[in-house]
C-alpha cells in the first residue's frame, strides 16, 4: 500500500500532462488503491501500477525492472511508414556507409540518404555524423531519414540540427512541471538551434518522418522544420515528448515520469499530436511490411526537383513549401 501511495504522489507531483490530457488522477487513485491494498506480492503490485499508469496514455511512462529493462504502459496504435525490412535491405546494399549501428548512409538514384535510427547516448557521437556528412559536402540535395528513430538525447539531436543552418533560430520551446498544482510550470523557455561545424549543409534537405519518430527526434524535427532549406515529408510524428525522470517503486522496480511540455517553434504542443509533415506521402501497410518504400521514393523525386530548382533557376526552397513556420 505504501508503495502505491508513494507512486501515486510522485506522479501527482511530477507529471506534466494532467491538464493537457484531461486526466483525473484522483479517480485513478480511487480505482486502483483498493486493489493495491490487497496485493500480496511485488509482482501483483507492479501489475496494478502498470494498469494505473496506463491511464496517462504516455509513451514515456514505463515500468523499469530491477535488471534495467523497461515495460511500456501505453502503445499508440498508429500505422508506421517504415519496416525493419527496409532498413535491413538498405544495410545490405553495396555502398552502405556505416557510422554506427544506429547511423548510416547510402546513395539511392544519385541522392545521398542518411539514416538516423536513434539519438540514444553512446550509440554514436556527433563526430560520427560529421564524418558521414563530410562525404556529401558537395551534394546538390540530401535526404535525412528519422522515421524509425524513437529518440534519445535532445542535446545530440540539436547538435546534428546545427549542421544544417547558417544562422541561429528558435527550434522550439518547453516548460517543466513546478509545484503541487497540476497547472504549475516554469516559464516557457526557447530552444535554440545554432550553426555547428566548420561548414553547414544549406542545400535542399528532405526530412523523412513518421509515426515511429518520437521524443528527441520530434525536437529534431521541430528544429529542422524552421529552416528554409528543409522540407518535411512522410507522415505525422509519433507525438510523444516527455523528458522523463525515473523514480523508485519497490524492490528495485521504478517508474519513469514525463516532466515537461515541449512545443514546436510556433508554440504548438507535440505530445499526443505529433508534428505534421509539409507533404504527406500515403503508404500501404502491406507494401511497407514487404519492404517497399513509397515514402523514400517520393522523397528522392522531390530532392532531385528541389536541387534542380536551386541550381537551375535560383528558386528559394521556401517558395516550394506548403507551410512555412
Image (cartoon, helix red, strand yellow):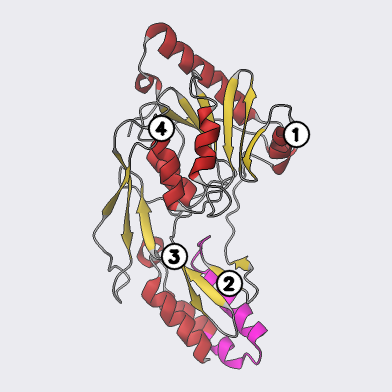
Inter-mark Cα distance, 2 to 4: 37 Å
Inter-mark Cα distance, 3 to 2: 13 Å
Name the residue: 37% across, 13% down: 315
Name the residue: 48% across, 77% down: 28
Residue receiving disc 2? 63
Q: Residues within 10 Å of mark 4 (few under 14, many from 20)?
A: many
Q: Could you say where residue 68 lies in the image, as x and y percent from the top left?
A: 62, 70
- Dot 2 or dot 4: first in sequence order is 2
Q: Is residue 85 left or right of residue 209?
A: right
Q: Is residue 181 left or right of residue 9?
A: left
**Looking at the image, do the residues carrying marks 3 and 4 touch, with CB atoms under 8 Å apart?**
no
Q: Is residue 64 visible?
A: yes
Residue receiving disc 4? 164
Q: Residues within 10 Å of mark 3 (few under 14, many from 20)?
A: many
Q: Could you say where residue 88 lies in the image, as x and y percent from the top left?
A: 73, 39
Q: Nearer the viewer, mark 2 or mark 4?
A: 4
- Dot 1 or dot 2: first in sequence order is 2
- Dot 3 or dot 2: first in sequence order is 2
**Looking at the image, do the residues carrying marks 1 and 4 touch, with CB atoms under 8 Å apart?**
no
Q: Could you say where residue 121 lies in the image, as x and y percent from the top left?
A: 53, 55
Residue receiving disc 3? 258
Which numbered dot is residue 92? 1
Q: Secondary structure at mark 4?
A: helix
Can you say which quadrant of the picture contains the C terminus?
top left
- Dot 1 or dot 3: first in sequence order is 1
Q: Secondary structure at mark 1?
A: helix
Q: Secondary structure at mark 3?
A: loop
Inter-mark Cα distance, 1 to 2: 36 Å
- Dot 3 or dot 4: first in sequence order is 4
SS majority, magenta: helix
8 relative to 302, above or below: below
Q: Which residues are magenta?
A: 33-60
Amino acid at each position: 500500500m505504501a508503495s502505491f501511495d508513494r507512486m501515486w504522489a510522485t506522479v501527482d507531483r511530477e507529471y506534466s500532462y494532467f491538464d493537457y490530457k484531461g486526466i483525473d488522477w484522483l479517480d485513478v487513485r480511487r480505482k486502483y488503491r483498493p486493489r493495491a491494498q490487497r496485493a500480496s506480492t511485488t509482482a501483483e503490485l507492479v501489475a496494478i501500477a502498470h494498469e494505473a499508469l496506463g491511464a496517462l496514455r504516455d509513451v514515456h511512462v514505463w515500468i523499469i525492472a530491477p535488471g534495467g529493462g523497461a515495460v511500456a504502459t501505453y502503445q499508440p496504435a498508429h500505422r508506421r511508414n517504415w519496416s525493419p525490412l527496409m532498413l535491413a535491405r538498405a544495410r545490405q546494399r553495396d555502398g552502405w556507409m556505416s557510422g554506427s549501428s544506429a547511423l548510416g548512409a547510402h546513395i539511392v538514384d544519385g541522392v545521398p540518404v542518411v539514416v538516423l535510427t536513434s539519438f540514444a547516448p553512446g550509440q554514436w557521437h556527433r563526430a560520427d555524423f560529421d564524418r558521414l556528412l563530410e562525404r556529401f559536402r558537395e551534394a546538390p540535395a540530401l535526404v535525412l531519414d528519422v522515421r524509425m528513430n524513437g529518440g534519445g538525447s535532445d542535446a545530440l539531436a540539436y547538435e546534428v540540427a546545427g549542421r544544417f543552418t547558417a544562422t541561429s533560430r528558435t527550434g522550439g520551446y518547453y516548460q517543466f512541471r513546478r509545484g503541487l498544482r497540476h497547472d504549475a510550470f516554469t516559464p516557457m523557455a526557447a530552444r535554440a538551434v545554432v550553426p555547428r561545424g566548420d561548414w553547414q549543409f544549406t542545400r535542399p534537405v528532405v526530412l523523412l518522418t513518421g509515426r515511429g519518430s518520437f521524443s528527441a527526434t520530434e525536437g529534431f524535427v521541430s528544429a529542422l522544420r524552421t529552416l528554409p532549406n528543409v522540407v518535411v515529408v512522410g507522415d505525422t510524428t509519433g507525438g510523444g515528448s516527455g523528458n522523463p525522470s525515473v523514480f523508485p517503486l519497490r524492490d528495485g522496480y521504478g517508474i519513469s515520469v514525463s516532466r515537461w511540455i515541449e512545443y514546436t517553434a510556433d508554440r504548438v504542443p507535440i505530445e499526443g499530436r505529433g508534428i505534421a509533415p509539409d507533404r504527406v506521402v500515403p503508404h500501404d501497410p502491406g507494401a511497407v511490411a514487404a519492404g517497399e518504400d513509397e515514402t523514400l521514393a517520393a522523397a528522392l523525386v522531390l530532392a532531385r526537383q528541389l536541387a534542380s530548382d536551386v541550381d537551375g533557376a535560383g528558386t528559394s526552397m521556401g517558395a516550394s513549401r506548403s507551410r512555412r513556420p
